[in-house]
Amino acid sequence: KTGMTFIKTTHDSRFGIDNFSCHAPAGFDGVKTCNAYTGDTDCETALPVLCVNIDNSPRPAYPVIDPGCTSCAMPYWFYFGWGRGNVASTTPVKASQFQTRQDVDAFCTLTFGTGWIVESWNEMSKWISGMGGADGLTYSGSEWTANADKIQSGGWGFFAYGNVRNDTRLWMHGPLDQSSTCWAH
């Protein structure tokens, strides 16, 4: 059995945010890309769990610039969404020790406190068409909150407050309609 993992790719100290992606940065020695459909890492592998505390913070003004992706299936904002809170990573554990998502959520809560749960594909990334730009200001701060009715769910990457380790992939909860999670949905 295999489970899905993500990796921190960058940290922006101006805002105290990390960028997470399915795809590892150049030079990473390990799994290069996640598999959101069937998992990418053996569940017996000890990796940190990526936990999140979603407090619905407004999106900071991080830049979102069209990377010129010609093979992207979705608008580029989809891949650079806002995680709406803080992230942290646990000590490495085998994902096979968890039977259900509730078990992983309880592990995050035990490790970091009330409100902390495992980061989930279906909840990780929110975006608004046109957000960001070179200066990052469009749909940031109070403008993000005022336009909540325009927020959509994204995937494959996101930003969140935090500064977790970047030397390993991290366990996440995969898409609800796929079998890419080591534990039961």
Image (cartoon, rainbow, N blue to C red):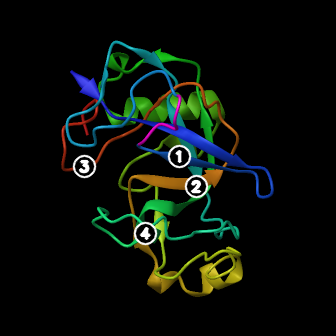
> Residue at position x 19%, y 50% from top?
177
Amino acid type at circle 3 is Leu
Q: Quadrant of residue 61?
A: bottom right
Q: Look at the numbered discs 2 and 1 and tell me whether their residues touch, using CB distance below 8 Å.
A: yes
Question: Main structural element of the magenta stretch: helix, strand or loop?
Answer: loop
Counting labels gives: 4
Residue position for label 2: 159
Per the model, the C-alpha gap separating discs 2 and 1 is 6 Å
Measured Cα–Cα span from mark 3 to mark 4: 23 Å
Residue 76, which numbered label? 4
Q: Quadrant of the C terminus?
A: top left
**Element class at badge 3:** loop
Q: Position of residue 94 (x, y in %)?
A: 41, 15
Q: CA distance from mark 1 to mark 3?
A: 19 Å
Front label number (3 vs 4): 4
Give the quadrant of residue 103: top left
The mark nearer the N terminus, 1 or 4, is 1
Between 86 and 41, the one lying in front of the other is: 41
Query: Which contiguous range is marked in magenta?
Result: 23-27
Q: Which residue is mark 3?
A: 176
- The answer to which of marks 3 and 2 sits earlier in the sequence is 2
